[in-house]
Amino acid sequence: MYKMIVCDLDETLMNDDGTLSDKNAAAIQAATAKGVYFVPNSGRSYTSFQNDLEKMQLRDRAGQYSISYNGGLILENAGNRPIAVNAMPYEMAKKVFQVGAANHEAATHVYTQDVLYIYHPTPEDSAYLTNRGVSFEVLTDTDFTRFKQLNIMKVIMALPTMTGRKEMRAAVEAQVDPSELAVTYSSDRYVEFNRAGVNKGSASVQLGKLLRIAPAEIIAAGDNSNDLPMLKAVGLPVSVQNGLDVVKSVAKYVTVADNNHDAIAEIINKFIL
């Protein structure tokens, strides 16, 4: 019996326009009514999906949980109470940021525990974020000392091509020991940097231990490469139909539906209800 579902948001649970379908929301409510935890597991900040939690009837709920920043933060939904903070060391985050800021094609994001800051925001990236309810503050200079006393969850760069994203990764890894980094790609636009050992999978297992749920009792659903650690860590890895081939290759089940046609409802109806 599966006791927890950890689920990516963008291009997995959410429609392409950033909305949560009524059918997916109803299925989530039915699963939680049976005592199954439904845990959003996103690269985004928890602040950006509070309205979606509301539609799931999970907002501000005691004993319900969310994972943000590719595993950087685990929260109890009631009061958005942090129960695990897996932040980047300041000096590491600073070096990653400096490499991103030096590239004038990149929009460089700094995710602190509660606020997203962007240096050199680009119109396309800003529109993508706004469409998903993601708010941010614009950095007008590269003075990183403003973050000295804050928890830095991750640093990511938006670049228009995979070639550019791979070049950015190489540039960062020339400045920071690659063994100290967890690097992923997401949404066909981002290269993302967390500290080593922090990813959607490690956070899923971490939360499972707190709830006394074994990895074999967890379903994970995703579509992109930053979801791979999550899929590899659980008993039932699922790819939505629009998932990358590499994601489908590690999945034990691939949905018939894509993210625009209630793929998560399909998973819940098949394996939970």
Image (cartoon, rainbow, N blue to C red):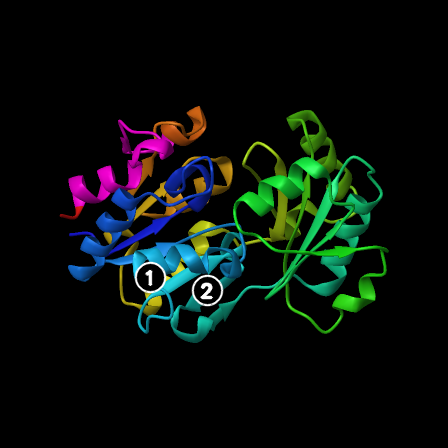
**Does dot 1 land on a helix, a strand or a loop?**
helix
Q: Which residues are magenta?
A: 250-271
Residue nearest the viewer, comparing 212 with 46: 46
Residue 74's disc is: 2
- The amino acid marked with disc number 2 is Ile
Does 262 appear in magenta?
Answer: yes
The image shows residue 177, relative to residue 57, as above or below, that is above
Residue 257 to residue 92: above or below? above
Rounded to the nearest angstrom, the CA distance separating label 2 from label 1 is: 11 Å
Mark before the other along the chain sequence, 2 or 1 = 2
Give percent across and percent down for residue 189. Answer: 61, 34
**In the visual, does 76 lie left or right of 82?**
left
Report the front residue among 236 and 187: 187
Residue 160, quarter of picture: top right
Taking the spot 52% from the left edge, 46% from the top edge, the residue there is 132
Q: Secondary structure at mark 2?
A: strand
Rendered location of residue 232, percent (x, y): 38, 42
User: Which disc is residue 208 wearing?
Assistant: 1
